[in-house]
Image (tube, rainbow, N blue to C red):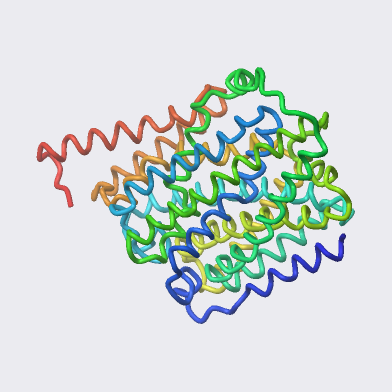
Amino acid sequence: MIYLILVFAGLHLLAFRTVSSENEFFHGNSEPSWIKTGASLAVTILGASAVFGTITLGYLFGIYGIIWIVAGAAGLAVLSLFIGYIKYDGRTFLSSKSGYSVFRYINSLVILSAWTLIIAVQLQVCCALISPYTGSSFFSTVLILITVGTYTVLGGHGSVVKSDIFQLGFMIVAVGMGLILVSKSSGGLEIAGKFNELTEKYSFIAFIPVMFSYLIGPDIHSRLLPLKHSTDRRKAIYFSILLIIPFSVAFALIGWYASNAGVIASPEKIPFILVSMVPESFRWIAVLGLLAALISSIDTTLFTALSISVNQFEIFSFNRRKFFFIFIICIFSGYFSLSKIDIISMMMSAYNIYIGVAGVGIMLFLLGILPEKEWVSSTAITISLVLFIYLKTTGVQFFYLFSMIPSVVIYGVYFIYAKSGKFSQR
């Protein structure tokens, strides 16, 4: 199996192509079709965070585990309504040519830290899947980071999209086969009490950051940005929703079947347990399918964090910035992955940081209605950041929602005064 894993990882390097310009690194060498973009978007969403968030929730709460991806699909549906109003400006959705320097610097740091945590989650699950075959979590982490880091930093957006299409085929085969085989290895499904168990452990408010992150998530917008027309962007969103909904049901059912088979495991061990429930002759397909889902999410998350950092922090030449930030992201994500922090907690922390600190300002920025006066945005995001840290450390429930209040109030007051003529608006 280890040789098969090494070959599969190596095949991803075929997605790599040297970019000839900075713009090609950010957008690819041509405008993709809405079908390819929608498929890439779906694969990105169905990567490690959503797949194993849904499988884990399915394992714990049965079919109601679909709430993770359903919340995300709701965010995408809302995004489709506003996509015609969104103003993409430059090489990333946070263009370095748009003013608002303090606002953009803090947002870039928030995205860099949050998406590094998400990569760590993805790596941790990936290592739990393949480490029994490679013999070492450290080796597995290094293998995935070197593979994904290489084609991402050298090939940019085009390489990531190309690898997504390659991974989608493996995922479809593996999920279909896995659902059939895992269901045969378990007994019936017991639904009683599952909804109550879910609501006792998680308030539905806890999934608001998930929905909001799909609405304003930088990885979502990095996929849509190369499409020039809002109609194509909307089609890509609808196509991705059409793909992810049946997958979410399948993932929840797989986790549910594993639970009803009497398997007891910590969340990060569930992928390997699922593989062990598949007959040995088919096990390699399950491993490669799950590995494809993981890598599809890792490369997108890595490219998002890398592209925003490279575009925003112009401290070296372009190529030096690429290799500097890929090194920083890989080191920290690898460290957090090997630290064995609970994956659900780490994922929720990442989404909470992004939504609680950056959410309101990013939404206004995308809609092109961020106040022209930079001090307004700088003050709002700075206060939200300080309040977020304070409420998080003091253990206040729903701290991420409370930390949004200063931004809502500051922007609200500004727009009221601007409408009354007290401030000049753009």
Residue 331, percent across and down?
69, 56
Identify the image quadrant of the N terminus: bottom right
- Drawn side of residue 337 relative to residue 214, left or right: right
- Number of on-image labels: 0
Residue 257, percent across and down?
74, 34
Residue 127, percent across and down?
78, 50
The residue lying at 58 percent from left, 55 percent from top is 43
Residue at the limit of the structure toward the bottom, as seen here: 20
- Drawn side of residue 112 relative to residue 191, left or right: left
Residue 30, percent across and down?
45, 75
Up the image or down, 298 lies above or below 360; here it is: below
The residue lying at 78 percent from left, 45 percent from top is 181
The residue lying at 52 percent from left, 36 percent from top is 352
Closer to the camera in the image, 327 or 68: 68
Closer to the camera in the image, 395 or 368: 368
Up the image or down, 99 lies above or below 25; here it is: above
